[in-house]
Image: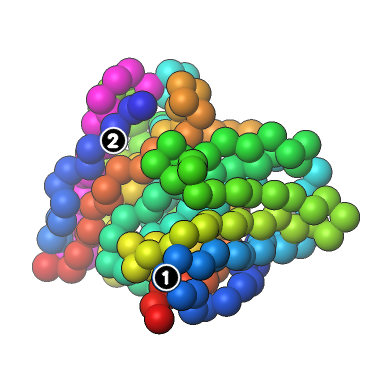
Amino acid sequence: QVQLQESGPGLVKPSETLSLTCTVSGGSISRYYWNWIRQPPGKGLEWIGYIFYSGTTHYNPSLKSRVTISVDTSKNQFSLKLNSVTAADTAVYYCARDGYGDNLDYWGQGTLVTVSS
Amino acid sequence: EIVLTQSPGTLSLSPGEGATLSCRASQSVSGNYLAWYQQKPGQAPRLLIYGASSRATGFPDRFSGSGSGTDFTLTISTLEPEDFAVYYCQHYGSSPPMYTFGQGTKLEIK
């Protein structure tokens, strides 16, 4: 059973960089597409971007200038960096897998990141 | 970029009733690559329907998806107490490559 787990700081200061890691267990990261999605408190889901295990990335155009997603196949992890954060970036951040179905079949439990001084 | 519009925003029903949730796309969805997710408070979304009509593992057959082109429907035949949640539709588009979600329908107990 594939499991994903997000980790990283829960509090980030405005203008700094948000950094999160997703650890994949129960399966290899060297297949499929690995995604980050976020959900502001009380709001809907917003896709941030994905990475293929080879390193190919695609990002949401609305966030593209601030986002970097990377993968470390040796650790079965992938990571998110979002720079120049503001309060509007406060959200629960989820990592999720697309198992070649154009949908997200496995999700992490999510981690709340608050942007505040 | 395809925009997905879900209706209604909130649906108030009682256990035992049937529910119909709508997802309308701004352009035709290729290959019927339309998915539905269920999200309960404090939990991650969970894949419910994929390919517009295929039910994901673990969901009972009271859940069904249908539709094609621009109009898709999630139907719950007989509501159980555990079905009250927020439901999102989602599409993956290739131009540009991105996942798009509807704004969600909250299914609440009347």
Q: Position of residue B60 (x, y in %)?
A: 45, 53
- Is B20 part of what is drawn in magenta? yes
| Chain containing the residue with disc 2 | B
Task: Check contact, mark 2 vs mark 1: CB within 8 A.
Answer: no
Q: How many marks?
A: 2
Outermost residue to the front: A15
Q: Position of residue A32 (x, y in %)?
A: 70, 39
Magenta residues, start to end: B14-29
Q: Which one is in front, B16 or A50?
A: A50
Q: Amino acid at mark 1?
A: Pro
| Looking at the image, residue A38 lies above or below residue A14 | above
Q: Is residue B91 visible?
A: yes
Q: Which one is in front, A84 or A59?
A: A84
Q: Amino acid at mark 2?
A: Leu
Q: Which one is in front, B37 or A109?
A: A109
Residue occupying image coordinates x 46% and y 75%? A13
Residue occupying image coordinates x 28% and y 67%? A42
